[in-house]
Image: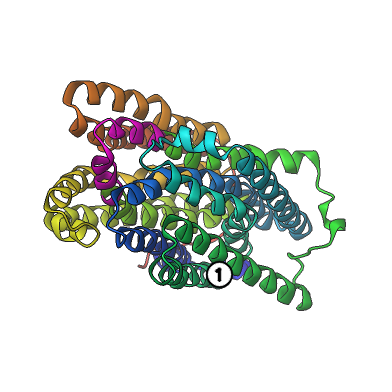
Amino acid sequence: MSNVFEEKNIQKLIVTLGIPAMLGTLATLIYNMADTYFVSMTKNPAQIAAVTLCTPILLIIMSVSSIFGMGGSSVIARMLGEKKSDQARKCITFCIYAMAVSGIVILVLGSLFMNQVAGIAGADEENLLYTNDYLRWIFFGAPVIILSNGMVHLFRSAGLIKEATIGIVIGNGINILLDWVFIVLMEKGTAGAALATSVGFLCSTVYYFACMVKEISRKNELYSLSPKSLSVTPAMTSDVVKIGIPGALITVMISVSNIVLNNYIGIYGSDAVAAYGIAYKIDMFPIMLSVGLSQGVAPLMGYCYGAGQKTRLRKVMRYATVDGIILGALFTALFLVASQILTGIFLSEKELVALSASFLRVLALSAPCLGIINTVTSYFQALGKAVSSLVITLMRNLILFIPGVIILNKLFGLDGAIAAQPVVEVMLAVVCIAMYLSGVKTEASKSVPCDIEVSDEA
């Protein structure tokens, strides 16, 4: 497995690790778009609004997987860099069991407090029924939603990069097919969208466990489902959770900030929520691809750090950040030019198309900043620097964003509320650069040799 991370050509290695992860996030994004597209075929703004309102709740459920998936991935990659395979195996097993238990807890609590959750998400009398229809099946699928999303990170950190991507594609492909069956053929609306999502994640989870069984039969020392491998130390558990919580809070805070934004947009009616929902879904392309790139490279960062390869780690950061900025700039150009065409795919009323297109043009302005923010966040997570990662997360979604929405909405109305995202992300990109440079200076003061010669050939 270590041969994957010891490739000397940095750009080639980033492509090897980043492209599968980006394809995985792209597949997830396509299924999200499919949900919205098929629901939009109902021509019912209340149903489109319900899917928009429930998206943060789905993201919060997924965030639990980040505690043990991203947290475990960081610990595993560093252990493999330190050649501690036995400890890495115990960490993988612990994380899988922890995700399964967490999913069951969410299933029970979500089912008991569904109406309260819908109210917090911003549902009103017009869309409450549709919102509950969606939430019911999402809570039912919580265990497999968490396992599927968490095992992706564990597989990547342990070298099963191709398998991680295949699992995502399988789950999302089935999800899209079932969207058509449940929403179009069976006319189940938002309930059909949520049911398709849960069944898709079930299929990908089954695939991941099949891969684990196969690796166990091959005597791969990194994989075990035996409870005996749960004998992890308190320090390891603490390390996983300490790193995973900031990773989870990224999703939770995004969800919380979106709930706040949805509530403010909701003041202007369901049409405004539906228009923003479409614009946000389209804007998720640069967001999720940037996340995929940074998450794909994160295990390499952790491996380099665990192996003491500091010069190599800095080069990985430089290449990955530049790649992310270029990717974001391309999407900014596309959205500025083709916003009307893109939003018109999902909406038919001219007023809604125009409103959604104007939202998309504003949201697109900060896409290049994502390459900086997400890469620096993954860098701190990979190195086990939980506090720095947490600071970025809190600034992005709590300290800056929520006050930004409130203030800009008061000053400029609906347009101001929408503009909060790009304003905050430009500011945060500057902060991230400063935090990274400060971190590099601190690490440089530690005398750890770089033991692998690195080629700069692209």
Label 1 sits on a secondary structure element that is: helix
Q: Main secondary structure of the magenta part?
A: helix
The x and y percentages for residue 216 are 77, 73
Q: Is residue 190 above or below residue 377?
A: below
| Snapshot quadrant of residue 31 | bottom left
The x and y percentages for residue 248 are 55, 42
The region drawn magenta spans: 257-278
Residue displayed at 43% across by 57% down: 292
**Foreground residue, 286 or 302?**
286
Residue displayed at 58% across by 41% down: 447
The quarter of the rendered structure image containing the N terminus is bottom right
**Foreground residue, 138 or 453?**
138
Residue most extreme to the right: 228
The x and y percentages for residue 138 are 54, 52
Q: Residues within 10 Å of mark 1 (few under 14, many from 20)?
A: many
| Snapshot quadrant of residue 11 | bottom left
Can residue 302 be spotted in the picture?
A: yes
Q: Amino acid at mark 1?
A: Gly
Residue displayed at 30% across by 23% down: 406
| The magenta stretch spans residue 59 | no
Q: How is the image coloured?
A: rainbow
Can residue 305 be spotted in the picture?
A: no
The quarter of the rendered structure image containing the C terminus is bottom left
| The magenta stretch spans residue 273 | yes
**Foreground residue, 203 or 383?**
203
Side of 240 relative to 427 (left or right) = right
Residue displayed at 14% across by 56% down: 340
Q: Look at mark 1 in the image and give the residue it sits on.
A: 167
The x and y percentages for residue 50 are 39, 46
Side of 413 relative to 204 (left or right) = left
Q: Is residue 152 above or below residue 422?
A: below
